[in-house]
Image (cartoon, rainbow, N blue to C red):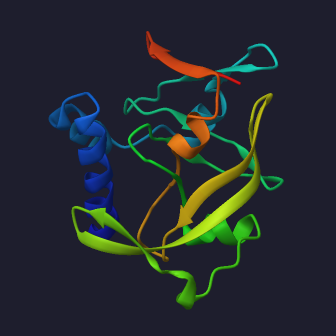
Amino acid sequence: MTRPILWALGVLASAALTGGSMTERFAKLTRGGPAPAAEAAQIAPGSADSVTLSQDGSGHFRAHPQVEGQVLRMLVDTGATLCVFTSEDAARIGLRVAERDFTARVGTANGAVPAARVRVREMRVGGITVRDVEALVLPSGRLETSLLGMSFLRRLRGFEVAAGRMTLRG
């Protein structure tokens, strides 16, 4: 139970370097997220190439992208260099990783964590589609929620955060 929390703290430490107070981010993390019904209503209508996400009660932005044809629940993390999948989500979208595939090392507050490098053919958030996305898969129990990181976000025309909303422009 503590390993995923420590891993999340490591991710938050990286995010803190790019802006924001670590204390604020930790407080948001420990308050938890909204009920699943509230999460479903977070995507606001937009144009075909624009999606607006609403901040949840813990201050996070959550997306429900379609990845390889399956809808996943992901935390938007601008501090994560790559998208990162839980082993369970990876299996749901058809990514098969074996123990020997965990050759990458990811630095966290809990030390180095093994990771498997993968590529996702297609990720879609609303009307925005990004193909050939570099990502990582972490071993079971090392991550609670998959992360929608910069390997997806940097391929957009842009994104911005204002007034509790994040707008993604495809």
* Residue at x 48% of width, y 76% of height: 139
* Residue at x 43% of width, y 40% of height: 33
Image coordinates of residue 99 in percent, x first then y, are: 54, 89
The image quadrant where one finds the C terminus is top right
Image coordinates of residue 61 in percent, x first then y, are: 49, 32
In the displayed structure, 126 sits above or below 98; it is: above
**Can residue 14 be seen by looking at this rendering?**
yes
Q: Quadrant of residue 106?
A: bottom left
**Can residue 1 be seen by looking at this rendering?**
no
In the displayed structure, 30 sits above or below 116; it is: above
**The furthest residue to the top:** 163
Q: Is residue 107 toward the left or the right of residue 59 in the image?
A: left
* Residue at x 69% of width, y 72% of height: 91
* Residue at x 31% of width, y 40% of height: 15
In the displayed structure, 3 sits above or below 19; it is: below
In the displayed structure, 12 sits above or below 18; it is: below
How many numbered circles does the render carry? 0
Q: Is residue 83 toward the left or the right of residue 3 in the image?
A: right
The image quadrant where one finds the N terminus is bottom left
Image coordinates of residue 77 in percent, x first then y, are: 45, 41
Q: Is residue 79 toward the left or the right of residue 17 in the image?
A: right
**The furthest residue to the left:** 23
Image coordinates of residue 152 in percent, x first then y, are: 61, 41
